[in-house]
Each structure stands twice: as structure tokens, then as C-alpha cells.
Amino acid sequence: MHEAYIVAATRTAGGRKGGRASGWHPADLAGEILNSLVDRTGADPALIEDVIMGCVGQGGEQSTNIARGAVLASKLPESVPATSVDRQCGSSQQAIHFAAATVMSGQMDVVIAAGVESMSRVPMGSPTILALKAGQGHPMSPRQQERYPGIQFSQFMGAEMIAKKYGMTREQLDQFGFESHQNAIAATKSGAFDAEITGIEITMPDGSKEIHKIDEGIRFDVTREGMANVKILQENGVITAATSSQICDGAAGVMIVNERGLKALGVQPIAAIRHMTVTGGDPVVMLEEPLFGTEKALKRSGIKIEDIDLYEVNEAFAPVPLAWLQHVGADPAKLNVNGGAIALGHPLGGSGAKLMTTLVHALKARGKRYGLQTMCEGGGLTNVTIVEAL
């Protein structure tokens, strides 16, 4: 079996809802990432054999195979095929798994795994909402309703369930959210994100042009007092908007190759994908599966949590990474060291590739070896990926 190497990884800076990146059509935004990966490797675009792209809101501007739309909006030739993946928030992490498996099998040698979500232009849940308004039915089928009678699948409720199960207080969650911003502020000011971000040109209200290259969601003036004043999302709950991931516009991608791909492109790898796991669990609590998926991944890989140098655990809601730390017995100092989705934003289908981009760059910058990435996903799913920096 072949190895799977990452030879380039990049992302756009996140944009707030209706913010700096909202003027970009998602196909064009993702196309910029494809262009950047080609530029960073100097690859002949014709050597890319497939593009696998995660996207959750596959309606409107993100419908009709957004991955192929991104290829046609990029410098890649028409001969490059593409397909879109929906594993909810883990969509582009799953794209990475598919791309890695493909080059490891030897069926292809050079594949791009990417993800995109314009949550400004295709609001979260809009394909379902529009279908309901048109009288076209609900995604929860009669047989699902029989299996889960009277149960509403809600990520907000699931996050509250986790907080209650693991005994988390409002103050603990606020502190975690505050630290996410502090880490993101430090990373931005130190230039830690410079190597991973692909700048995009935006038009300002006065018609002038700027390059968007700083994550717009970071609150550089954040205070603990300010976070404590944010209202809770549910009565008798502990989670607020300040301890939840931010709505975000963004795209990210990684180029994955095997040994033949390395020779064909004439490049050196920056990381190798050492392990991939995907698991399913309780769809009601929904967001707890990263805890159990990580256990399985560590057992299958033979790598101990103590051997992992950095972790990226998506901050969909603060209780998720906090419960993960507690259950896995991981070191908080290694978690989301450059901030997470609470500060940087969570562009749904783009977040898997976004986190991987940050992880491999952080490993390189810190001279570390192993990194682990995981994220909670709608339906009670999780992906876990272990990489080794080279």
C-alpha cells in the first residue's frame, strides 16, 4: 500500500456573516483555494486527478456539485473531475479521508481535498427550510420517527446535554471561549497564520480594494466580563453565542499525493497521513462522538494520546472539546493552540480542511511530530485523523 502525503495546505481567512468574504460566490472562493494549492506546489494543473470537496448547504449557489463548479472557476483544466461530499461538519475532513484512501490504493496519485461554505449566501439549513416551504417534505422519514418518537435532533440541545453530563458550569465555558480568542489573537499578531492563509481581494464600501487575510471573527477587545454578559441560548442552559462556533464564510484545501505523485510533481511532503477513523454514535446527544472515535483511533493506530503533540478538536460548542479533554485524558496545553471555531469561525463543510491546514502548519512551526484532528458532526458522527509532520 502507498503512503498518503500532504504537499500543500491553505485556507482563506474566515469572514463573518455578511462580512468581508460575503461578496464572493462560493465556487469562486473555493476556486481560489484550488489555484493557491497549484501555485504553492508549482504543479502542472493537468496532473490533478480529482477534486473532492466538502460542503453542507448544497443548495442555491452551492448546489449542482459545488466541487465541479470550483474547478470550472479555477485555473484547473476541464479535464479535472470533481465531486462534493456531505458528512455535515466533517465534510472536508471526510474529503481528506477519501483523497488519502484513493492515493494509498494507487488508483490515483494526485488528489485535492477541499471544502467550502458561504454561510452568508447559503444560510445554514436553507435547503431543508426551502423544501419545507415548498411542501417537499422533511428529511426525517416516518421510519426514523418510529425509531426516535417525539425526539428532535438538535445540536444546541446536544451541546447542553454534554455540558450537564460532564458537570460544566457557565464560568468554565466562558473561560474556554475567552482563551480561544486569546490564542487566536496571539497567533494572528505573531504571524502564525501568515503561511497558511490565501488572501482574497475584496471590495470595500467606498469601492477601494483590500486583501482579506485576517480572520474576521476574532474579537481583539474580548474580555471575560463581556463574555459573562452574553445571554444564554436556552432557558436554564449554560451555553451562549460567545461559547459557540461563529457563522463563517470560508474555504480550505490540501493536496494529497502518494510516492508517484511526489515524483511527478517534484515536491517534498510537509506531512503524512498516518491514521483515519470514522465512527457513528448517539444521534440525539449527537456531538459526543469525537470522544469515542478518538479512543478507537488511538487503539487502532497504536499511538498513545501522550505521543500526540497537538490536537485540533472543533469548537462547535465549548462543551465538546472540554468533554473530549476530560474523557481522553489529553493535555489542555496542546489543544487548539492557535484558537478554534469560537474565535475563528466554523464554515461547516470547509472546517475539516481548515483545521487540517492549521494543524500541519502549527506542527511545522513548532517543530512537533504528531497531530490529531477530530470534530463532531450532525447525526452523531465523527472523523479522526492522525498526521505526522515531515
Image (spheres, rainbow, N blue to C red):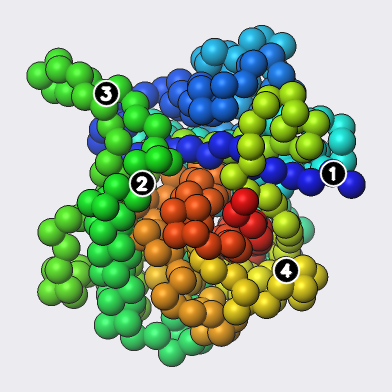
Which label was assigned to residue 325?
A: none
Lower sequence index among marks 4 and 1: 1
Secondary structure category for the residue under label 4: helix
Q: Label 4 amino acid?
A: Ala
Q: Residue at x 51, y 46 (%)?
A: 357
Q: Label 1 amino acid?
A: His
- Label 3 to label 2, Cα distance in Å? 19 Å
Q: Label 2 amino acid?
A: Phe
Describe residue 168's horizontal placement relative to residue 41 as left or right.
Answer: left
Q: Residue at x 30, y 63 (%)?
A: 183
Which circle, 4 or 2, is nearer the viewer? 2
Counting from the top left corner in percent of width and height, residue 92 is at 60, 44
Q: Is residue 241 at least partly visible in the picture?
A: no
Describe residue 91's horizontal placement relative to residue 215 as left or right.
Answer: right
- Label 1 to label 3, Cα distance in Å? 41 Å
Which label was assigned to residue 193?
A: 2
Residue position for label 4: 297
Q: Residue at x 36, y 46 (%)?
A: 193
Which label was assigned to residue 202?
A: 3
Describe residue 336's horizontal placement relative to residue 389 as left or right.
Answer: left
Lower sequence index among marks 3 and 4: 3
- Label 2 to label 1, Cα distance in Å? 31 Å
Q: Label 3 amino acid?
A: Ile
Which circle, 4 or 1, is nearer the viewer? 1
